[in-house]
Image: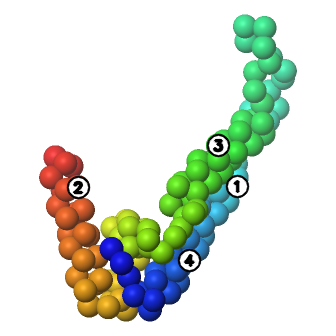
Amino acid sequence: MDLSKKDKRLSRELIQKALETECKEFVKKLQQTAGKTIPLAELNAPYSEENGRPVEKPWHKRYRQLYKMMLNFDRHIAAVYDNQTGGHYFDIVGELYCKGLLTDDDIARFDEDTQVKLIGLKQLSEAFHKKHKK
């Protein structure tokens, strides 16, 4: 869908808002995971091997867990937010709206035609998910 210049600018603003929201939530989740207490028994466990290989110690396990979280989040962010062009703004905003990262108040700032199409897209998405949840 072709957007007006005003709607394109608003799209860029709202895309940035959603990106900030996702990053904030991810950093909180990362902090929670990093801050989990490791049981003393695991920390003090002696060196051991399994099938001739060292058994992973708790801090290295935690590091790998955090690394995987970062890698997956980075892939998600790249898929949604990288290489945005004006021709894709409507699709991106629609996806963010359907996911709940943008609100009805955010969408109300668009031109009426754009609002109607975004609301219709969200209703269609909700109906699809409701039907396939059963």
Residue drawn where x is 23% and y is 55% of the image: 129
Q: Residues within 10 Å of mark 4 (few under 14, many from 20)?
A: few
Is 96 on the left-hand or right-hand side of 13? left
Mark 4–mark 3 CB contact (< 8 Å): no
Amino acid at circle 1 = Gly
Q: Which mark is residue 3?
A: none
Residue drawn where x is 58% and y is 74% of the image: 20
Residue bearing the label numbered 2: 129
Q: Position of residue 93 (x, y in %)?
A: 41, 73
Residue bearing the label numbered 1: 35
Quadrant containing the N terminus in the rendered view? bottom left
Q: Position of residue 111 (x, y in %)?
A: 32, 91
**Mark 4–mark 3 distance (CA, rounded to whole Å):** 24 Å
Nearer to us: label 4 or label 3: 4
Is 21 on the left-hand or right-hand side of 52? left
Q: Earlier in the sequence, mark 4 or mark 3?
A: 4
Amino acid at circle 3 = Lys
Residue bearing the label numbered 4: 16
Q: Residues within 10 Å of mark 2 (few under 14, many from 20)?
A: few
**Mark 4–mark 1 distance (CA, rounded to whole Å):** 28 Å
Nearer to us: label 4 or label 1: 4
Residue drawn where x is 28% and y is 84% of the image: 115
**Mark 4–mark 2 distance (CA, rounded to whole Å):** 26 Å
Mark 2–mark 3 CB contact (< 8 Å): no
**Mark 2–mark 3 distance (CA, rounded to whole Å):** 28 Å
Q: Earlier in the sequence, mark 4 or mark 1?
A: 4
Mark 4–mark 1 CB contact (< 8 Å): no
Nearer to us: label 2 or label 1: 2
Q: Earlier in the sequence, mark 4 or mark 2?
A: 4
Residue bearing the label numbered 3: 68
Which of the pair 68/62 is nearer the observer? 68
Q: Earlier in the sequence, mark 2 or mark 3?
A: 3
